[in-house]
């Protein structure tokens, strides 16, 4: 039968998995395999314990993931893979391809044995409280933005309204002191609402242009994500004026 090309192949056990000691002193597992699609058979070898006594944790983790081994007695793998054993029905993935033997001639060299899907594992979920404490406000601000007349656009002030948000490359200016006459504080949403209330009937393009033009005038080189409460209050007050530049 032709030697399979380099790739990943779905396989099953084609006989009993054997735990043995190599001449070097290492503890190994001989895994007889058959490709489910082509019927090509070969043997895959795995080292469980090196000659110096070091347990190969990656190998043991793979055998546990593929065959459901509890990691205690490696001979369990032999017991459960004999004729009629439960492990015979399990499919797994072998990565390998053609190689030249020491005495010449091609053979199939298996390199890795993995669970189906390449050994991908479902990650452990992050702590909800910790993540929301760190990023909750950022997610909230992002979710509240959209390019419509009723939603605050989230685009840096020095970029066109149609461009994707980018991290400003200019150095951040030190926070300025709020004017004595400005309100104590406001939010981005309140400033946006003031702009829309003072410009009834205007289309979205006009509203967005006025928003960015005013931001650029009041706070050059600053993105709306950098503004503080007193700066949003200043912007809100600007939008509440009877007349704004068109």
Image (cartoon, helix red, strand yellow):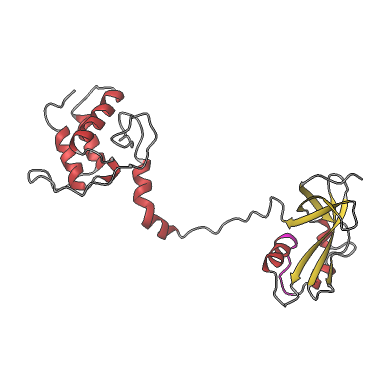
Q: Residue drawn 41% across and 60% down?
A: 130
Prevailing secondary structure of the magenta residues: loop
Asked whether, in this view, residue 241 is left or right of residue 172, the answer is left
Residue found at the far left of this picture? 181
**Does the segment drawn in magenta span residue 14?**
no
Q: Position of residue 57 (x, y in %)?
A: 67, 68
Q: Residue drawn 21% across and 49% down?
A: 174
Asked whether, in this view, residue 126 is left or right of residue 153, the answer is right
Q: Is residue 20 above or below residue 116?
A: below
Q: Where is residue 79 in the image (x, y as percent from the top left)?
A: 84, 69
Q: Where is residue 172 in the image (x, y as percent from the top left)?
A: 26, 47
Give the quarter of the figure containing the C terminus.
top left
Q: In which quarter of the image is residue 92?
A: bottom right
Q: In which quarter of the image is residue 209?
A: top left
Give the quarter of the figure containing the N terminus.
top right
Q: What stretch is highlighted in magenta?
A: 66-72
Asked whether, in this view, residue 2 is left or right of residue 207, the answer is right
Q: In which quarter of the image is residue 88?
A: bottom right
Which is more toward the observer, 116 or 104? 104
Q: Residue drawn 38% across and 53% down?
A: 135
Asked whether, in this view, residue 210 is left or right of residue 121, the answer is left
Q: Residue drawn 78% across and 72% down?
A: 74
Q: Where is residue 145 in the image (x, y as percent from the top left)?
A: 34, 37
């Amino acid at each position: 039968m032709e030697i399979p090309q380099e790739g990943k192949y779905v396989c099953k056990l084609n006989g009993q998995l054997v735990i043995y000691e190599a001449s070097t002193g290492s503890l190994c597992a001989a895994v007889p395999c058959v490709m489910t699609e082509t019927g090509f058979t070969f043997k895959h070898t795995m080292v469980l314990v090196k000659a110096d006594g070091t347990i190969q944790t990656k190998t043991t983790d793979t055998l546990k993931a593929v065959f459901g081994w509890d990691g205690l007695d490696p001979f369990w793998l032999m017991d459960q893979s004999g004729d009629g054993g439960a492990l015979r029905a399990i499919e797994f993935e072998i990565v390998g391809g053609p190689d030249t033997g020491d005495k010449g001639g091609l053979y199939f060299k298996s390199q890795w044995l993995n669970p189906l899907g390449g050994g991908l594992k479902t990650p452990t979920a992050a702590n909800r409280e910790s993540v929301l404490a760190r990023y909750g406000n950022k997610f909230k601000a992002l979710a509240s933005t959209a390019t419509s007349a009723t939603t605050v656009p989230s685009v840096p002030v020095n970029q066109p309204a149609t461009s994707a948000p980018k991290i400003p490359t200019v150095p951040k200016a030190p926070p300025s002191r709020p004017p004595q006459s400005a309100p104590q504080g406001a939010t981005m949403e309140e400033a946006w609402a003031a702009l829309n209330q003072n410009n009834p009937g205007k289309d979205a393009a006009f509203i967005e242009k006025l928003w960015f033009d005013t931001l650029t005038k009041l706070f050059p080189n600053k993105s709306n994500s950098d503004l503080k409460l007193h700066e949003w209050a200043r912007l809100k007050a600007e939008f509440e004026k009877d007349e704004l530049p068109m």
